Amino acid sequence: MTRFDDHWCETLTAAVAEAGLADVDRVLWVITDTADGKAAFVVEMLDEAVTVSAGRLPRGTKAQVTITVKEERLLPLLAGERSWDAAFMRGDLKVEGAYERWLDGLVPLFSTEPWASAWKASV
């Protein structure tokens, strides 16, 4: 499985199918410095469901939060080896858009057991 591809996204979607949701509709992740260059995936939390899809959002669709991070910095976060807050404060990830939703909704959500387990299993 190639990291951040459709299969990876489907696996993550299944793992967090019953996880809590944040007050954010769409989160675009842009991962730089991967073996294949730049990659992206979108986490959508709409209508009480979570979906993760590879690639960028369709034209005319915007993410409420866009996170840009180097792959080498993201993998320890996904594995639960580093704190999301600490990574942001160190400048390891860039958050654009609704920062307050990232801070109040997504950071606590991504630290819950279903999300943390799903992230960890994906790396």
Image (cartoon, rainbow, N blue to C red):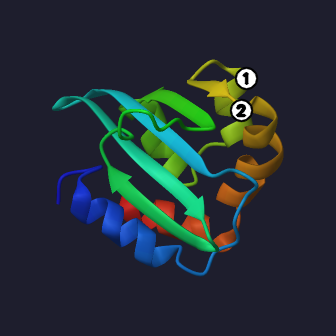
Which residue is painted at 38% across and 62% down in the image?
122
Q: Indicate the secondary structure of the residue bearing disc 2.
A: helix
2 and 1 marks in contact (CB < 8 Å): yes
Whole-percent x, y for residue 30 in the image:
41, 32
Give the side of residue 102 with respect to residue 45, left or right: right
Whole-percent x, y for residue 34 in the image:
26, 31
Q: Amino acid at mark 2?
A: Ala
Q: Return the residue found at the far front.
A: 60
Give the side of residue 116 with respect to residue 57, left or right: right
- Residue holding disc 2: 86
Give the side of residue 93 with respect to residue 121, left or right: right
Whole-percent x, y for residue 93 in the image:
57, 26
- Residue holding disc 1: 89
Which residue is painted at 55% across and 38% down in the image?
63
- Considering depth in this image, is 58 or 78 the residue closer to the camera? 58
Within 10 Å of disc 2 (Cα), the crowding (few <14, some 14-19, many 20+) is few
